[in-house]
Amino acid sequence: MRRAFKLELAEARAMVVAAIAEASMLGVGETVCVSDEGGFPLVLERMDGARVTGPQIAWNKAFTAAGHRRSTHLFNTPPNGPALPGNEAFGIQWSFEGRFAVFVGGFPIVVDGEVVGGIGLSGGNGEQDTACGLAGLRALQELLAPQGHEVLVAVDIKK
């Protein structure tokens, strides 16, 4: 049996605060979802003026990143993205009642080498969603560093 880390509400909130601060700096209305390891939301926040479709999309991205342990954009990145036509996971985006997201904006949350959740963002373009996601991961890194934990802050995460 092994011990597992669990992402807690205060940590998820810190990530959302950082992601929204980055979105404000970029001038984009984002929705941010931080999920647990099973893809269920711990915090879901939509900025004033952000699209009404954002909460579902952000949740889907967090769900996919946590559950499949990879950044969502890697599913359709040529040439070997598994969800591209002709590749092994083509059509996976219709799994889980359409909840599986295969485009930019979802990142697994990796602490000490283990996936403990996901962060999903919706509202900006791919670069903006990515910048906000990385801001959220950096906030967790800063929060956990004094306790000796390592948080992976990267775009192309595949665990």
Image (spheres, grey):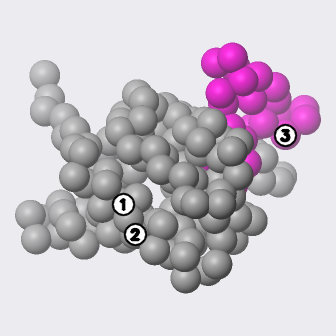
Inspect this view and state whether residue 105 appears: no
Magenta range is: 82-107
Mark 1 residue element: helix
Query: Which mark sits nearer the N-terminus, 3 or 2?
Result: 2
Q: Nearer the viewer, residue 159 or 24?
A: 24
Q: Quadrant of residue 146?
A: bottom left
In which quadrant is the N terminus drawn? top left
Could you tell me how far apart the alpha carbons at marks 3 and 1 are, in whole angstroms? 31 Å
Graded by Cα atoms within 10 Å as few (under 14), some (14 to 19) or many (20 or more), the crowding at tag 1 reads many
Secondary-structure class at tag 2: helix
- The majority secondary structure of the magenta stretch comes to loop
Q: Which amino acid does label 2 sit on?
A: Ala
Farthest front residue in view: 48
Q: Which residue is drawn at 69% across and 17% down?
A: 97
> To which residue does mark 3 refer?
84
Which residue is at 64% across, 18% downward? 96
How many residues crowd around disc 3 within 10 Å: few (fewer than 14), some, or many (20 or more)?
some
Direction from residue 67 to residue 144 in the image, left or right:
left
Q: In this view, does 70 lie above or below 37?
A: below
Q: Position of residue 125 (x, y in %)?
A: 75, 65
| Residue ID for mark 1 | 15
Work out how far the residue at label 3 is from the one at label 2, CA to CA, in angstroms: 32 Å
Q: Can residue 66 be seen in the rendering of this structure?
A: yes
Please identify, in this view, whether the residue under mark 3 or under mark 2 is nearer the observer.
Answer: 2
Q: Is residue 110 left or right of residue 58?
A: left
Report which residue position mark 2 lands on: 18
In the image, residue 18 lies at what x, y percent? 40, 69
> Where is 156 relative to 56, above or below?
below
Q: Which amino acid does label 1 sit on?
A: Met
Q: Which residue lies furthest to the right in this view?
A: 85
Question: What residue is rendered at 39% in x and 44% in y?
Answer: 43
Q: Could you tell me how far apart the alpha carbons at marks 1 and 2 are, in whole angstroms?
A: 5 Å
